[in-house]
Image (cartoon, rainbow, N blue to C red):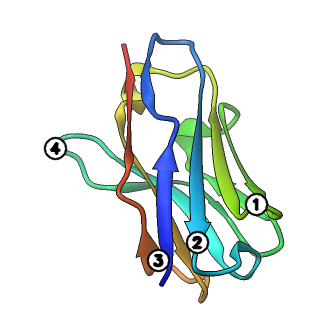
Amino acid sequence: HVQLVESGGGSVQAGGSLRLSCAASGYTSRNYCMGWFRQAPGKEREGVATIDREGGTEYVDSVKGRFFISKDKSKIIMFLQMDRLKPEDTAMYYCAADARCGLTYTYWGRGTQVTVS
């Protein structure tokens, strides 16, 4: 049974930093593509960053140069380092994983709230 648990959210002032973690269990993350998504109140969920099996990464334009996605393979944990945070980054952040590495993700965490003031 695959489980994803996010942590590291919180409230920060604009310009600050946060580091989100996603702990995976029930599979070996090396074999899965993973990603971070976010959803702000009244808005649709959007993809923030993804990382594939080989470590290749992609980012939505609005976070390029500020956010960095990575995986700790030995501990099956994915991270999202968020620097120079802006109020528009305020959202619930979710991690997701899928073995097919397509456009959709099968497994989702419950989310961690990020608030930037």
Q: Are marks 3 and 2 in contact (CB under 8 Å)?
A: no
Badge 2 crowding class, 10 Å Cα cut-off, few under 14, some 14 to 19, many 20 or more, is some
Q: Is residue 20 left or right of residue 42?
A: right
Q: Amino acid at mark 3?
A: Tyr
Cα–Cα gap, marks 3 and 2: 16 Å
Front residue (pair 101, 31): 31
Q: Are marks 1 and 3 in contact (CB under 8 Å)?
A: no
Point out the frontmost of discs 4 and 3: 3
Badge 4 crowding class, 10 Å Cα cut-off, few under 14, some 14 to 19, many 20 or more, is few
Q: Are marks 4 and 1 in contact (CB under 8 Å)?
A: no
Cα–Cα gap, marks 4 and 3: 22 Å
Mark on residue 75?
1
| Residue 30: x %, y % from top left | 76, 75
What residue is shown at x 56% (from left), y 12% (from top)? 15
Mark on residue 25?
2
Cα–Cα gap, marks 2 and 1: 10 Å
Point out the frontmost of discs 1 and 3: 1
Q: Secondary structure at mark 2?
A: strand
What residue is shown at x 50% (from left), y 43% (from top)? 7
Residue that label 3 marks: 105
